[in-house]
Amino acid sequence: MESITKNRQPVEALRALVARAYGPDQVCDPAEDWVGELGDGCFNVAYRIRLRSGAQVVLKIAPPPDVEVMTYERGAMATELAALRLIREHTKVPVPAVDFADRSHELCYADYFFMTYVDADNLDAVRNTLTATEIDAYDEALGAITRELNGIPGTAFGPLTGPGESTWRAAFLRMVEELLGDGERRGVDLRHGYDVIREVVAAHADSLDEVTEPRFVEWDLWPGNCMVRDGRIVAIVDHERAFYGDPLMEFGFAGSESGAYGNSAAFIRGYGHRPFTPAERTRRRLYNLHLALVQIIETNFRAHTGTEQYDWACERLRETVALLGEQAR
């Protein structure tokens, strides 16, 4: 997927990064077919690289420093590295191993890291080839994986790398306000007044007070970030959006309040979540509102040339505001 946040580098620069990480003897001859861009991501650029030993690795490079990103995306690579460390230390969820990370900006004017390459299929890419039974099995497995990730405790609500908040209400309201500030600064049309969104969120903020324990939330755990092989999920990738918060904010629950995000039944079954309480349904609607704001506003920051995502997300915002409005009456 195309985005101005993708920090593509010339071949000689890539060779220098490989030499820094693995040693000069692992850099392939320039004439060989040793590097190719992985096109699935929509934020960082990622390259599949073959070392002279024959091993396959992935290089991810953060956006250029002169490209403005959304507030919550600042320091995203540091967040991903922290998430990968936490997942490997506290769970058995399969994730790539980090081979080398460099934030010195000596060879590249952005953060970058190398990780192991996962030889598997992207679940979103093959989903249309699967039977309904196979899709349900993957969604159930994704629910179980998500629950395991949510078992990682935090000491404060908010970014993995800090600063944090003492309450989930404060952290979530800050997340929403940062999004609205990004949109206002860029003049993004939400097809709603910004103050209307603020009023809707404030009217239901009491529901956030039920959440008292900060938990690891992957948030962006959708089929496009799942690698599968032989009927199993063999790796979870792209962890730069993780934070400490309410597990109910995980993407897998989004379909429980909007069928546009898919059917959440198998995910919820795999997760083992009981039926939602009224307060939980309210929170999930707030989280769908937050998700729609991200999807709308990022189209401006990433300079999308088409309007498909923008139009779709504006409709999701409209329906979620309507649901919360009906609940308030």
Image (tube, rainbow, N blue to C red):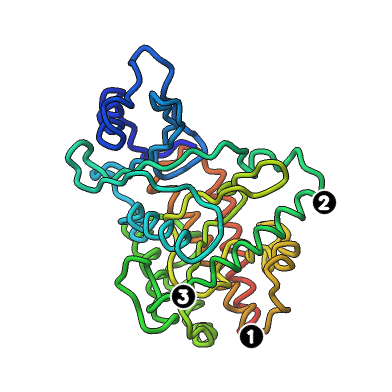
Amino acid type at image mark 3: Pro
- Residue 173: x, y in percent? 41, 76
Residue 14, above or below 306: above
Earlier sequence position, callout 1 versus callout 3: 3
Which residue is labeled 2 in the image?
133
Say few, some or many: other residues with alpha carbon within 10 Å of mark 2 (under 14 / 14 to 19 / 20 or more).
few
Quarter of the image for residue 123 reads top right
Q: Which mark is residue 261?
A: none
Which residue is labeled 1 in the image?
329
Q: Would residue 93 be found to the left or right of residue 56 on screen?
A: right
Camera sees residue 139 = yes
Camera sees residue 196 = no
> Is label 1 in a helix, a strand or a loop?
loop
Name, please, the residue furthest toward the top.
31
Give the Cα separation between the discs numbered 2 and 3.
Answer: 33 Å
Q: How many marks?
A: 3
Where's the C terminus, which quadrant?
bottom right
Quarter of the image for residue 229 reads top right
Earlier sequence position, callout 2 versus callout 3: 2
Residue in the picture at 52% in, 62% down:
219
Name, please, the residue furthest toward the left.
106
- Residue 250: x, y in percent? 56, 65
Say few, some or many: other residues with alpha carbon within 10 Å of mark 1 (under 14 / 14 to 19 / 20 or more).
few
Amino acid type at image mark 2: Thr
- Residue 255: x, y in percent? 67, 63
* Observer-nearest of 99 and 136: 99
Marks 1, 3: nearer the viewer: 3
Amino acid type at image mark 1: Arg
> Is label 3 in a helix, a strand or a loop?
loop
Q: Would residue 272 be found to the left or right of residue 153 on screen?
A: right
Marks 1, 2: nearer the viewer: 2
